[in-house]
Structure formats: C-alpha cells, structure tokens
Image: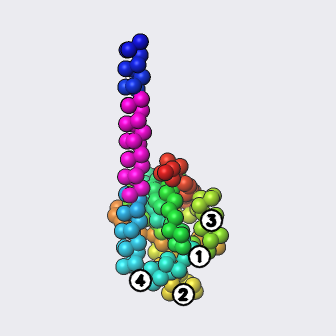
Amino acid sequence: MKLKMIASILALVLLSASASSAADKNEEKREKSRKMAAQTLKDLYKLQPTSEAAIQKSAGYAVFNNMGTNLLLLSTARGAGIAVDTKTKKETFMKMISAGAGLGVGVKDYRVIFMFANNKALTQFLDSGWSGSAQTDAAAKAGSSGAAYSGAVEVAQGVWVYQITKNGLALQVTLQGTKYYKDDNLNKK
C-alpha cells in the first residue's frame, strides 16, 4: 500500500515537473520569436526607412524567419514567427511551411515581413493563414504605390510583404506553395 502511494506521489511530481518544463520551453520559444521580430524590423527600417511609418500606421504586421533549401527539382522551407495587432499589441505566434518544384540549388536564410493595411486583412491572415504560389527571390518594387511601400510587394488586397535575405546563397527559379498558420502550442497561456 505504501509503495503504491509513493509511486503515485512520484508520478505526480514527475508530471508536474514535465508540464512546468514544457511551459518554460514554450516561453523561451515565444521570447525567441519576439527578439527575432524586433531585430528583423530594425534591419528593415535601416534598409527601407519609410517602412517604419507604414508599419506603425498599419492594422498589424507579422514577421517570420525562414530557412529554405532547393535541391535540383525540390524546394522546401520552414519557419516560425509572430503576428502583432498594432492597435491592441496582441501577439499571435505562427509557423510556416512551403514546398515547391523548380530548377535550382541552394540554401537561404531569410526573413519575411507582412504588413496588413486594414483589420480585415489582418483577421483573415490570423484566422485562415495565408498561402502563396510564387517565390519572391528578386528585389521587390512598389510601383505606383508610393514611397511608403518602397521595397514591398502587394500579395493580396491590403497585404504587403517585405523580404530580407539574412545569409546564404541560392540560384533558383521556383513555383512554391507556402502556408502560414497559428502555432497552437505557443498560443496557449
């Protein structure tokens, strides 16, 4: 009887410790995403000074770090990030994954910054994620959209994207499907 009680207590202590450890690891991941986003925005503002005012005036933004590889005919990428409502400062932690086909060889570490011009675009991104079908390796142009969006590409109504390649070398031409979605583990509190 005493042995069962001791075993039950030990099991409870181990379960509590592992749950606490998982919560600590999730908080570390959230903090890592916050730091990555802050540094990426700092880099973006240095490269595209008008982007700072545009992002501050936007309904929200999302920042992702991505690692992409392209080996002959297969192109893949995965990453993580954070979306922020600029009015409420509410954070939503997210993931991304992509796969595609195209000719190329290389590895690329890059950052993607989404800027949402209105609440509808932000809400749709948070609720449904976003899927794309083109790889944006070339330098982006704002066209007739003015200086506020210099360096950004409008990928959907009210959704602008900046991309910064951190390091790596890639020579590729790909068509790629990309999915951005909520990270259920990191959004639990």
Q: Distance between the residues labelled 1 and 2?
A: 14 Å
Dot 4 corresponds to which residue?
Answer: 49
Q: Position of residue 162 (x, y in %)?
A: 48, 72
Q: In this view, does 130 lie to the left or right of 41?
A: right
Q: How many neighbours does mark 1 have within 10 angstroms: few (below 14), some (14-19), or many (20 or more)? A: some
Dot 1 corresponds to which residue?
Answer: 117
Quarter of the picture holding the N terminus: top left
Amino acid type at mark 2: Gly
Q: Distance between the residues labelled 4 and 2?
A: 13 Å
Q: In the image, which residues are magenta?
A: 12-31
Amino acid type at mark 3: Thr
Q: Which of marks 1 and 4 is nearer the N terminus?
A: 4
Q: Where is residue 88 in the image (x, y as percent from the top left)?
A: 54, 69
Amino acid type at mark 4: Pro
Query: SS of the residue at dot 3?
Result: helix
Q: Distance between the residues labelled 1 and 4?
A: 18 Å
Q: Are marks 3 and 2 in contact (CB under 8 Å)?
A: no
Dot 2 corresponds to which residue?
Answer: 146
Dot 3 corresponds to which residue?
Answer: 123
Which residue is at 41% across, 16% downward? 4
Front-most of residues 6 and 24: 6
Magenta part mainly helix, strand or loop? Answer: helix
Q: Foreground mark, 1 or 4?
A: 1
Q: Which of marks 4 and 2 is nearer the N terminus?
A: 4
Query: SS of the residue at dot 4?
Result: loop
